[in-house]
Image (cartoon, coloured by chain):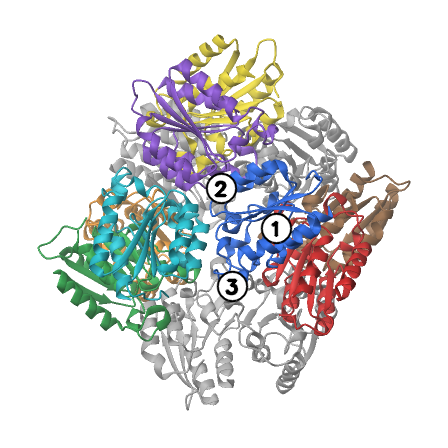
Chain colours: A red, B blue, C purple, D cyan, E yellow, F green, H orange, J brown
Amino acid sequence: MAKKSRKLRVIVLHGPNLNFLGKRDQAVYGSKTLDSINKSIEEHAAALGIEVATYQSNSEGSLVDFIQAEASGSGAIVINPGALTHYGLSLRDALQDTGLPVIEVHLSNIYAREQWRATSVIAPIARGQISGLGWRGYVAALDILAAD
Amino acid sequence: MAKKSRKLRVIVLHGPNLNFLGKRDQAVYGSKTLDSINKSIEEHAAALGIEVATYQSNSEGSLVDFIQAEASGSGAIVINPGALTHYGLSLRDALQDTGLPVIEVHLSNIYAREQWRATSVIAPIARGQISGLGWRGYVAALDILAAD
Amino acid sequence: MAKKSRKLRVIVLHGPNLNFLGKRDQAVYGSKTLDSINKSIEEHAAALGIEVATYQSNSEGSLVDFIQAEASGSGAIVINPGALTHYGLSLRDALQDTGLPVIEVHLSNIYAREQWRATSVIAPIARGQISGLGWRGYVAALDILAAD
Amino acid sequence: MAKKSRKLRVIVLHGPNLNFLGKRDQAVYGSKTLDSINKSIEEHAAALGIEVATYQSNSEGSLVDFIQAEASGSGAIVINPGALTHYGLSLRDALQDTGLPVIEVHLSNIYAREQWRATSVIAPIARGQISGLGWRGYVAALDILAAD
Amino acid sequence: MAKKSRKLRVIVLHGPNLNFLGKRDQAVYGSKTLDSINKSIEEHAAALGIEVATYQSNSEGSLVDFIQAEASGSGAIVINPGALTHYGLSLRDALQDTGLPVIEVHLSNIYAREQWRATSVIAPIARGQISGLGWRGYVAALDILAAD
Amino acid sequence: MAKKSRKLRVIVLHGPNLNFLGKRDQAVYGSKTLDSINKSIEEHAAALGIEVATYQSNSEGSLVDFIQAEASGSGAIVINPGALTHYGLSLRDALQDTGLPVIEVHLSNIYAREQWRATSVIAPIARGQISGLGWRGYVAALDILAAD
Amino acid sequence: MAKKSRKLRVIVLHGPNLNFLGKRDQAVYGSKTLDSINKSIEEHAAALGIEVATYQSNSEGSLVDFIQAEASGSGAIVINPGALTHYGLSLRDALQDTGLPVIEVHLSNIYAREQWRATSVIAPIARGQISGLGWRGYVAALDILAAD
Amino acid sequence: MAKKSRKLRVIVLHGPNLNFLGKRDQAVYGSKTLDSINKSIEEHAAALGIEVATYQSNSEGSLVDFIQAEASGSGAIVINPGALTHYGLSLRDALQDTGLPVIEVHLSNIYAREQWRATSVIAPIARGQISGLGWRGYVAALDILAAD
Amino acid sequence: MAKKSRKLRVIVLHGPNLNFLGKRDQAVYGSKTLDSINKSIEEHAAALGIEVATYQSNSEGSLVDFIQAEASGSGAIVINPGALTHYGLSLRDALQDTGLPVIEVHLSNIYAREQWRATSVIAPIARGQISGLGWRGYVAALDILAAD
Amino acid sequence: MAKKSRKLRVIVLHGPNLNFLGKRDQAVYGSKTLDSINKSIEEHAAALGIEVATYQSNSEGSLVDFIQAEASGSGAIVINPGALTHYGLSLRDALQDTGLPVIEVHLSNIYAREQWRATSVIAPIARGQISGLGWRGYVAALDILAAD
Amino acid sequence: MAKKSRKLRVIVLHGPNLNFLGKRDQAVYGSKTLDSINKSIEEHAAALGIEVATYQSNSEGSLVDFIQAEASGSGAIVINPGALTHYGLSLRDALQDTGLPVIEVHLSNIYAREQWRATSVIAPIARGQISGLGWRGYVAALDILAAD
Amino acid sequence: MAKKSRKLRVIVLHGPNLNFLGKRDQAVYGSKTLDSINKSIEEHAAALGIEVATYQSNSEGSLVDFIQAEASGSGAIVINPGALTHYGLSLRDALQDTGLPVIEVHLSNIYAREQWRATSVIAPIARGQISGLGWRGYVAALDILAAD
């Protein structure tokens, strides 16, 4: 369980290819760029009194490095693991090792696409998952964390 | 896609055993009763200018009957199918037949419990899914629908 | 095997969501309503000298109740189990317990849709199955029964 | 574990098609009717100083409703779930939610019939299971409960 | 979809071992010989104003040859693929390449026999399937095609 | 079916590690030793007018030897196969070869433990199975046999 | 069961690629050509007073044709189905339709090669199978048939 | 490959329950007792100039002990492993460790019975297998070994 | 490995339904007819100094016959097995028996279509495979063979 | 579909361990080093009037970074994903996001090695695949792209 | 957890066929005999101040008997279960019932041989496993136990 | 096999998240930090006259880079792949390409945790594996290598 710090600090992670939002198939992922989504997250967080640290990488190792470096000063993690959702077991271990509550977010409904996208190796160690609700899924995740 | 009515009307459905909330294992499902959750939903809906019609049944057939009766005047469906999540194919057909956007909500993280709870027959025809975030999952679903 | 009564009486059952025919996806299920199909069945039955008793329910329990109540005076059962085709084991037991010949009918070709629709738990205890030939499948079933 | 009430009250449930006992294949299910079995249960219970409440339904929802209504005044549940044994996950949740000890009874040996009958979704949350010993299985279940 | 020719011409194909009807196990396949069935088909077709071209072969390659040669002048195909039902992927491709509507017919109920008979590689590209209704299944197929 | 001898003689077999009862995990297997259980069985059998021959071995071969030696003078077998339940196919053949009715007993509920314990190779050739009801399961088995 | 004719006539069939014996990998299939094997079979048959009719084809359809043409005058079939062992379901049906006893022979041990060679679709309808004993397997099959 | 000794000595092993031949289901296993089969084997071996050492045990461990003790003076092994065919991996290792050619014999056709009997853990290390040809299968095995 | 003949001779085989190229779905298979493709192959081969022998058949047996007849004078095989790719084990054995290098060619990308098309029984014995690159795949195969 | 630029620019990617070519098992991968292969690719491209950009990395993240950086100015991608072929779902997404035609190349025949190498997660989104034809597979890929 | 006795006593068990070490395939198992290995174990144990009790049997039942007899005076178990590794569930239960720490040792690397050797039913209840390091694996196990 | 250099040099690799030892769940992984473990390894290596090169990375690509750079001067590799154990196929190829003996070490018993941890993609190409014996597993690996 997250220790509620004076001001809650939330790590917001974006996995591989999410830096391509806006260029990827917009029928699936929506038209907002990652910068635009991060800006919406930051504005909403500010309104909730939450501090956010956003990070994107195409490399599983870099995501693990970031989690290890930032976990100790943070109270929760919101993560869209991209395709690592389905095989990133090192990422899973890193998230679990922090002991922080993790909310997994997917822009698209991973249960209505290819069969292999319907299995998340992250979900079993997450507190919860929001799938298919677009960029507002991140906002909803912050709302939940703020309400704890 | 839901036709946005003058005032959005959302069907909120609770499947089998959810009327036992408060009596069911609170470590899994939380301590709020279904009445209390419905009240929170209604208050939040009112604040968003959304009309809600809540319904609970332990019978799949009754849920299908309700969906068929109420769909034409509504713009979206929020549903926690309870254990029907995993085998309620008639419920799935009924939801899909309405043509309305469906958001699937689970109080507990269905991916962190028994293996059979990790497969939803509803999710492939839903717009999205929120799992493991407790009663606030319903509220988040309304927020998304209101933002459309 | 059906005892050939003076005048053959056939139970015609429609499972969940079939009362929505005409509203469901017409590319899959055709444009006729259930009332219209039942009328065609009754007219064809009359021409064949067969008495029919039609019934639709969204509830598996109600279908089982109807079968138990009506079986003793009837000589055969024609059933479109809807989505119960794939998991309605109680319905299967009820049909088998009557000892009557059962013909399973599907409006759409269940072998050309989602994978889960390709397995029928009813078929192993049926005399035969007609799939994908629209409402005329019911008529064909009556023709077969009349020819016994 | 069941709290031993002054006088133990046991819910005895019969699932779909068990009201057809005596008409169903007697080589499999025996020749006694459900009324006859219930009478044997009641007589044996009386001899043991146990109160029983018997109920049969072809509808999973009704069984769940009954369990929810009767659980609080009872100390144990004996259930023959019929075909719901194999897919009635709502029934499973309802039984588990009561916190009462559950003994699952099958008239026939479910492990010596069709493959799908060999898996019970109820058994993992039951205290025990008696299969293949006919109506005396219910009596044995009462003996066990009385001896607690 | 079949172009309705002036007079509908239907290819009726019988796969391996169907020339042995009358000698094969009659409890499974009925007592009529293939000649007798073809005669019934032709008489029924004549009554419906349909022209039929019947063909039987024990060789998948010959069936494909026949389909390729006869497809262009025909409006539909009725086929009982015999054991090729379960592995005849070349036959499947040939049928699909014609662009004609295909109705698959089985004398016996393939879902009530050995497990491997319950999967048809033809069904996913067929318009529909009739199984277990004996030689009248061919007649029913013609009725459906005549009604288009 | 067992030939009812003048006085019914029942073989009661205990498989590997059951001689360690009382030392094995008591939360799973109960606190009674095998000697104590056998004594309870013998007393109950005497009250029912049944003769019992009890035997325990850690070796599948010895159990088979015992069954072969004792079957001809006996009318039924009650067996707790221990871990052989899950792979003892030689034991299964030996039991089946006797032609005697077999009741399989498990102290713990084998359906609520490790996945591999949920499959019994003995059950398909048994008359019935009692699982999870502790040492009283043996007593219940004798009651059933006495009532034949 | 084969009707023992005055003089037993046995069909000996060789499936695809067996005409290449002597050219195929000799470490697997031995060094004898098919002609040489057939000669050994005929000599042994003559010594046993058995008439044999040998046939080889690379085409499943031709093998089926031959079986249908020759079955009525014969008392048994010995067959090495070659690769059709693993998918020749039409061949299986043809063999079964004859009602004759079938002995399946393989030169190599099909259980010690590629995984897919370890499953025979012919074996379930055969009287027996001899695998891995080279060309003497045919001789052994004749010995068994002669001893009936 | 077996070193051909002056006079070939063959170990003939019978696994669990084969000492019950004559008492086991004769429709499956034939009517000859094991003693009678062994006598036929010995007579045939004598005619072929082969020495045989026969052994039966219900215990896998004893079979392994016997193989280890007798292998060095022998040139081949004929074994009917009984139910150990399907799980006796220690027996497999023991047979393989001898380096002798092994012929596996089954009285009944293991591919036409329960599904689990269709997989032999012995076959992959055997030279060949004879299944379903009754006691003459042993004789055929000796013929093959004598012909080496 | 192919023995490089004075002038390399390559067998080019086309399996079932490839004679329908130009009529089959052109979005999948392209618009060139088989004659046109063969002409392109022959022209390219001539330019490379390679002799080609092309052959098409809808029958697996005929393809095997052709391979057996032509292999001895040839140095390599290029084959598009059509649907036999997925079940033609006799074809596989025939190809392997030649000892020649085999290059498997598919016009369409078999890994981006129905699931069953993604498994080739030919590939494990081929030297290589070219899939999804249209008729130029044949040309590329010749280039590779010429470069050996 | 690739927009044909004035001069086609093709990204040629080499995944993990391909920089070790020449040191890796030469029987599997050939004796050319990666530098040598790249030189052959560049020479052949120059002859075809194609510009190539080659890149190798042992890190999936770096490959994704490179693809994202280089895609916009390029017309096609040729990739040998190394072991990422079998689990590199992030790489797959990156390739698919570019919208460029992708040709997958493997030096060895991935269908004739360990079972896990026979499944490519890249192939379903590729235009085609060339496997087992050594370094000339890259050259063939360029030929195909040049011919578009 | 093992209670550290004054002087640690360790049971060292060798399963089926390990008495054949030195005769078994030395490329797999090494050239040392079991006596030689036991001597090395004893010398190393003596140096560590550990008492060892070694035992080998080809019979699972005897191994269980030994464990039950010797467990109470011992502090740990080192076991090479031989082929019982893969199906010896009685042995597993016996080991687990002792409550002692168990270290599983394999001479060969069980993950680099036949597929069925890669699953150990013992490992889930062991403290650890050493595989593929030859007889020194036993020595390493003692070192670990001595260091507790 | 490792060429024994004048002084053996061993690469010791630690995969993702192992730099978090001491912070990760100590009940699973123990309380020592990675620095402390490395120090123990180095001291033990020094005592054995072995040189060690330790390296940790959260990135699979970096581990591959390190292996490629360091392999040529080393004689063996000891690796704890962390979660890459279960999907790091690039790491596997890199290890195998070195031709050095590899010993795989796991702090925890990977066979007694989540199901997915029980499969190692590294083990089939390793010389051996040590699992569940804590940091002393590294020491044992060095002992084995020193004894070669």
Q: Judging from the image, what secondary structure is the residue with disc 2 in?
A: helix
Examine the image and state in which quarter residue H94 appears: bottom left
Labelled pair 1, 2 in contact (Cβ < 8 Å): no
The span from disc 1 to disc 2 (Cα, nearest Å) is 29 Å
Q: Judging from the image, what secondary structure is the residue with disc 1 in?
A: helix
Query: Percent from the top left, x then y, of residue D40?
Result: 22, 50
Q: From the image, tell me which residue sits under label 1.
A: A118
Q: Measuring 35% from the left and 21% from the top, which residue is drawn there? A: E22
Q: From the image, tell me which residue sits under label 3.
A: B26
How busy is the neighbourhood of tag 3: few (under 14 within 10 Å), some, or many (20 plus)? few
- Which amino acid is tagged 3? Gln
The span from disc 3 to disc 2 (Cα, nearest Å) is 27 Å
Q: Is residue A147 left or right of residue D83?
A: right
Disc 3: which chain? B
Q: Measuring 38% from the left and 33% from the top, which residue is drawn there? A: C66
Q: Which mark is residue B62?
A: 2
